Image (cartoon, rainbow, N blue to C red):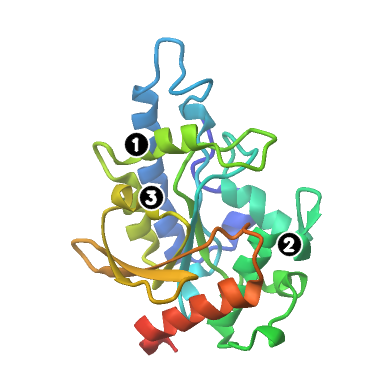
Amino acid sequence: MINLIPDKNSDLFKMYTDFEKERLAELEKLFLDWYNFFKSNESNSGAIIRNFSADDMSFDGFYPNYFEQRIKILYIAREGRGISGENYLEILFPAYKDNFIGNEHINKHEFHRRIFYLTYGFLKKEFNFQLVPNANDISPIMGTKEFSFAFMNISKFSNENDSYKSDYEIINKSVELSSVKRNFIQEEIKILNPDIIITMNLYDYFAAIGNIKLIDNSNPAVHAFELLTDEKKYLILDSFHFSAIKTEKDFFFDPIIEVAKKYKSELF
């Protein structure tokens, strides 16, 4: 059986608060249902699409002390890479602490350093990009009451290609199964209960997430949306993908914080 949540005997799991362990239990139940639904859609050969089966699913969630943060930020991306059957958090947390994502230093890794820069800006109320520390200077406080966030991929299949391009065939299949009868994607969001959701060029998949309406597209770098559920409204800021070759300050940091402050002023 694949890892639905971080190993309960691991040092990572021990870092979660008692309240967060209850949320992890909720995620574990959801992920098991999710896994079983994918399993029920396997062909006689055991595959769902190409050579991907339910055992290739990669689950995610939140890092320790996320629920202790001043602002709970959820990042939603498209897909993991090279982690089929692995728990995303178990792979990335030690990588963050070691300052290396694979063989690449975190300061050179556009995707992850931008998450660190933005999270730091939000949590520390540091809105001057020039004063935000390098990612490797932030990593020591990752997973503490000072700095944490939630992360999920909209696809629970991992891209196993060598190409940098997204594997839309498996993304589309995962999203389809995750929303066709039961909206597992929205259920994960509800458990994470973020104050702000930052998505990475996911507009084409919004219909699968739920009832989402555009509220502001005046900033070309980030558009604001609302996800309406039975319980509450969630602010979604859809930006360029965090691996896009664009300058951090002008296309990610400044515009995302500017729009967030406009629609969540009570948090600032």
The percent coordinates of residue 223 (x first, y second) are 40, 69
Q: Earlier in the sequence, mark 3 or mark 2?
A: 2
The residue lying at 33 percent from left, 67 percent from top is 225
Determine if residue 26 is in view. no
What's the distance in space between the residues labelled 1 and 3, CA to CA? 12 Å
Amino acid at dot 1: Glu
What's the distance in space between the residues labelled 3 and 2, CA to CA? 33 Å
In the picture, the quarter occupied by the C terminus is bottom left
Seen from the viewer's position, the closer of residues 210 and 63 is 210
Quarter of the figure with residue 263: bottom left
**Left or right of 44 on screen, residue 121:** right
The residue lying at 56 percent from left, 69 percent from top is 148
Q: Residue furthest left?
A: 230
Q: Which residue is mark 1?
A: 176
What mark, if any, has residue 97 been given in the picture?
A: 2
The percent coordinates of residue 50 (x first, y second) are 51, 21
**Local crowd size for mark 2, using a 10 Å CA cut-off: few (<14), some (14–19), many (≥20):** some
Amino acid at dot 2: Lys
Q: Report helix, strand or loop for mark 2.
A: helix
Q: Which residue is mark 3?
A: 204
The percent coordinates of residue 137 (x first, y second) are 76, 75
Vertical order, 167 against 196 (above or below): above
